[in-house]
Image: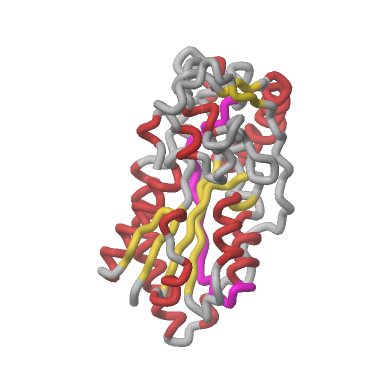
Amino acid sequence: MKCAVIYFSLTGNTKKVSQAIYEGISSANGQCDLFQLKSVDLNSLDKYDLLGIGTPVWGWAEAAPVRIFQESMPSLDGKHWFMFATHCADRGGVFYHMAKTLQFKQATVISYRSWYGEMWMPQYPKPYPTDGHPDSIDLSEAFEYGREVVGLSEQVYQGANNLIPQTFGPVRDRLHLEYIPMQLNLEKCSYPKCRLCEKRCPMGAINFEKKPPLFRQPGRCVNCLLCEMICPKGAIEADYAKEEARARETVIQGVIPLIKKATTKGYLRQLVPWSDLKVDTPLYRTEKWGKHPRIPLSRLP
């Protein structure tokens, strides 16, 4: 059985889980490839018997690059696929949306799994209740999941169709993500010496070859905020004030109850004590991350 693990990761959470799943599959099967989403040749998918695709959860659904990738895939001719995700509170309808597209492409979806991850949105508090994940225990679970999914695929190929999931988690519409105002300050920008934001933009929504530079191209920018977080000069200026207040209310009214419920049920091993959580201190205002770049570049895939 030839296998592949494909992933999109913005800040490194999904990359860590992908690597662990890949290692688990390799230990069980010996034939597995690991790909970043952007490096996948769509025409090569048919040579694999089992494929996994991983994404961070954005607005209760898969990340935009993953959605576009899946919609661009050719017919998958019944090949086995599994899905996995990382999230910071609630996986939402991510697997419902992903499975719907995979099944439209004639794939057989045999499994899905999610893990908690660190939060890196500037307007959300730091530390965040799920910070510290995925840790060594999570990655050990991901490794074992890789081993398990190989055995599952083998059984289904042998006719055990009763092992195929009939549902894929809750059915939830995608959330509308607030579009935070940003502007590029060319006086601070060190282009052409630095093109970090342009190279790292997951949607290709930044183009310095244009005159004036094209920044956050309408219809392409998905408001992931990565460009602002990684700019070493602070040349990308964002107004987080309005969104900061909304994020605080989201944490108080939505995230904290979800985390407490998940912890009580044993879904989450909370590594951040509640006493350390300061809902009025968003990441971009903290001493450690108040300057640029806000996110360590070593985390990036």
Residue 130 is at least partly visible in this image: no
- From the viewer's perspective, tell me whether residue 172 is left or right of residue 58: right
The residue lying at 55 percent from left, 55 percent from top is: 66
The image shows residue 13 at horizontal and vertical percentages of 44, 42
Measured as percent of width and height from the top left, residue 162 is found at: 54, 80
Q: What's the residue at 59%, 52% (across, down)?
A: 62
The residue shown at (68%, 28%) is 247
Residue closest to the far top: 287
* Relative to 237, residue 218 above or below: below
Most foreground residue, 173 or 47: 47
What's drawn in magenta, residue-wise? 103-122
Q: Is residue 97 above or below residue 248?
A: below
Magenta stretch contains residue 93: no
Residue 287 place in picture, x, y as percent: 48, 12
Specify the color scheme. Answer: secondary structure
| Snapshot quadrant of residue 240 | top right
Q: Residue at x 47, y 67 (%)?
A: 42
Quarter of the image with the N terminus in it: bottom left
Magenta run includes residue 117: yes
Between 127 and 231, the residue placed more toward the observer is 231
The image shows a total of numbered marks equal to 0
Tell me: residue 194, above or below residue 266: above
Q: Residue furthest bottom?
A: 159
Using the rendered image of the protein, determine whether residue 136 is visible from the camera's viewpoint: yes
Quadrant that contains the C terminus: top left
Does residue 269 lie above or below 297 as drawn?
A: below
